[in-house]
Image (tube, coloured by chain):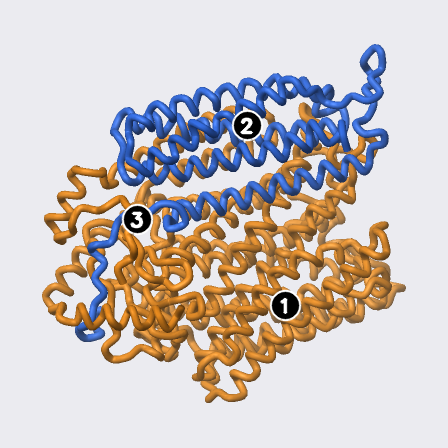
Chain colours: A blue, B orange
Amino acid sequence: MTENALPRKTIDVRDLPSTLFDYHAPLWWGNTLLLCIETTMFGILVAVYFSVRQNLSPFPPPQVDSFPVNYHPVPDLLIPTINLAVLLVSLIPGIWVDLSARRKNEKAIKIGLTITLIFNVAAFVLRFYEFNSLHFRWDDNAYGSVTWTILGVHMLHILALGCEDIYLLVWTFAKGLDEKHALDLTVTAVYWYWIVGMWVLLYALVYLSPRFL
Amino acid sequence: MNKDNEEKIKEEKDRKQSRLITPETIEAERRELEKTWFEPRGIIGWFSNTNHKTIGLRIICTAFVFFLLGGILALLMRLQLTRPENNVLGPDLYNQFFTTHGTTMMFLFAVPVMEGMGIYLVPLMVGTRNVAFPRMNALGYYVYLIGGILLYVGLILNVGPDAGWFAYVPLSGPEFSPGKRIDLWSQMVSLTEIAALIGAVEIITTVFKQRAPGMSLNRIPLFVWAQVVTAFMIIFAMPAVMLASSLLSMDRMMNISTHFFNQAEGGDPILWQHLFWFFGHPEVYIIFIPATGFVSMIITTFARRKTFGYTALVLTMIATGFIGFGVWVHHMFATPLPQLGQSIFTASSMLIVIPNAVQLFCWLATLWAGRWNLKTPLIFVLGFFAIFVMGGLTGVMLASVPLNLQLHDTFFVVAHFHYVLIGGAVFPLFGAIYFWFPKFTGKLLSEKAGIVNFILLFVGFNLVFFPMHILGLNGMPRRVYTYIPETGWANLNVLATIGAGVMGLGALVFIGNVLYSLKRGAIAGENPWGADTLEWSVSSPPPEYNFQYIPVVQGRHAIWEKTEDAAVVTGLSVKLRETLSTTIQDAVPEHKNQLAGPTIIPFLMSLVIGGVFIGFIFTPWAMPVGLTASFIVLFIWFWSNSTSHRPFTHGKIQEDAKKEDGAPPAQLKPTEANV
């Protein structure tokens, strides 16, 4: 380029902004592609679930080591449904943080992010009890294996997002809000929406489908 | 849209015409840029590098080292098969060798080398300064390297995997493969696929968001299109094998013992085959499509004319990408599947011939109407035509269920996929190395040695693999370490082994050529071949920042269609690692994007990831420990990445920038791009 004489015409970009939100931002694309990868993961787990279902008749398999024998051990609904509600309600502070980041409202972010984090921790803790609702251990049979894996992988996402929230919270309290972290907050929000949305589908698969389908 | 865009750019150019750049400012800005984009030296500096060219070259070199190792294993296997009842390798070592050979070539050579070429070339071709996420890019390389080393350390310690590169259960399950061999394999798969996925995200984001102004979607170089299609395929195919291999290692682990593939407890061995081939067949196209990108670039350059059927070529790549996901069951015709299903997959396997044929037609038409410049890269492409078409024809044969059942697990299949993969990917790759070596190093490879290299590879290749068609038709099975003299297979096997030796000589000539040319090769200059894409508009090797001024692209063939008064982009900071973000469709400048600089943290992170996966071979506790360690390292990573970013209203960096290059305060609100 350098020796190509002197380029006379120029497009001057110094007035352009340095951060844009949503699909304008490379970071948003990185996150979205990550979610594509993870959605594929869950898609394949769902396929595995149905493969297992095809192999087991009756489904879920009878729980023979309990007394009396549980011939139709469908998963319990109480705790999982509470957890689903927790996740859905957590969208409210989540969206609030998302919007506040665009409005550069630092105070709202601090409050909203803290609330989101509390919901996040609650969902994580409730998930531990959710495993009991399945009636099987992961090593009892393939049905137990696949349901534990679906719950576990999703739990890892809740954990990962909780860590991101902690990081962003520490940063915002320590250094205040800047352009880059405002973008980070909106992108993290997309991740949270995805986690909740994914769980609505997986909840229906794990808890409702053996009961009603 | 495109016309609109051109007009807009033209208007803008006229408006700004008055701004002149003097030689003094050019020189001063160049020095600043060199300082800003300087990558640290020394050992710690080596592990801190985040430049896409350095990382890309490292991936390519590492992949070639694995190619060589995999090739040596192949030679040893050929040696074993030369005579009936030979005893060079025992059955156990033979199993480990063919498994490691296949695993190396697919996971450690073919996919990484194609992505490495992409990571080196894509940012240059689209006219930007680095990939979108430079630190993650570095992380990908180290994770891949750790995965590769793991496999070979295993082989040396006699824990090399021995259940085939596809590791079918139940053979690879806890019952029939005790010990750690398969666990090593499955962790290696996860590590290399993490690296591949990182590369894919990098490439898509870079192409979507960082193209030079004017490079609308219909002007993207064909190689870049190939990389984008491949990256999307990686994103939707690789998770299948990562998940499957994780499920396998959970099935195998003593204190976990899940039952995914255990028939007795509701699992299913066939499920493994579905999951594996749902990745495994797209994998073939993940390797082949970038190679078609090489072929398109080489043919256009050496036919010295515009590519015939640009749109058709792009569409065929996309079509191949889609159809590639619908053919995996043709690897499983020997399993009890419903016949209707088999018919559907036969049809889709034959369907994929159509886009490939259209592609070949476009290339031939370009060559037909071109003025040939018959240099080594083009010769390799001609070799590709011959070999790949033959592989394609046996592919059509294998797509038919009855014939497939007959030939399943024979050397016919070995012949077929080597024709497809070596013909379809390795020949174009060698062509590409001859083509871009001058850009990588500034030196030309020797043409004479290149022709010798080609002849040895081409003759050797056909000597090894053509006889295998006949051996397969005669019933010689794959993956069996020897055969008895009464079969009458000995003569053809001798021929194949001689061919392998010839190919080995070809590889030696190539290595010799590279080493010699690095020292004594002719100086290449900017554009030795008269090629058309942007990487040839900068010095060889390119400066760390790629382009001092981001160019404005005026046509599909950026260099050929550049006019005398072509505009360039100014106003990017020379003090920060800034690059231009443009819109996805029309590449209109949108915002300035600051990229991360060098740091050793990605390397530390890769050690954590490697540690988790290797630890998981021995204990499930590696998981919680690894998660905690990851959190700590990532925290440091993010924190350090954030220090140079611009605050909203006031701050040191921003004022510095203002002082240095007169930039006004950055605004947060999304403004309409002003070009």
Residue B627 at x, y = what percent?
49, 28
Residue under disc 3 on the same chain as residue under disc 1: yes
> Between B554 and B411, which is closer to the camera in this rendering?
B554
Q: Is residue B472 left or right of residue B50?
A: right
Which class describes the residues within 10 Å of circle 1: few (<14), some (14-19), or many (20+)? Answer: many
Depth check, mark 2 against mark 3: the one in front is 3
> Between B86 and B301, which is closer to the camera in this rendering?
B301
Going from N to C along the chain, the mark reached first, 1 or 2, is 1
From mark 1 to mark 2, how far is it between C-alphas?
Answer: 45 Å
Going from N to C along the chain, the mark reached first, 2 or 3, is 2
B630 lies above or below B86: above
Specify whether residue B217 is in view: yes
A81 lies above or below B141: above
B615 lies above or below A7: above
Q: Is residue B512 left or right of residue B401?
A: left
Going from N to C along the chain, the mark reached first, 3 or 1, is 1
**Which residue in the protein does label 3 denote?**
B670
- The kind of residue on which mark 1 rests is Gly
Depth check, mark 3 against mark 1: the one in front is 3
Residue under disc 2 on the same chain as residue under disc 3: yes
> Which mark, residue B501?
1
Residue B106 at x, y = what percent?
60, 55
**Which residue in the protein does label 2 denote?**
B623
From mark 2 to mark 3, how far is it between C-alphas?
Answer: 42 Å
- The kind of residue on which mark 2 rests is Met
Depth check, mark 1 against mark 2: the one in front is 2
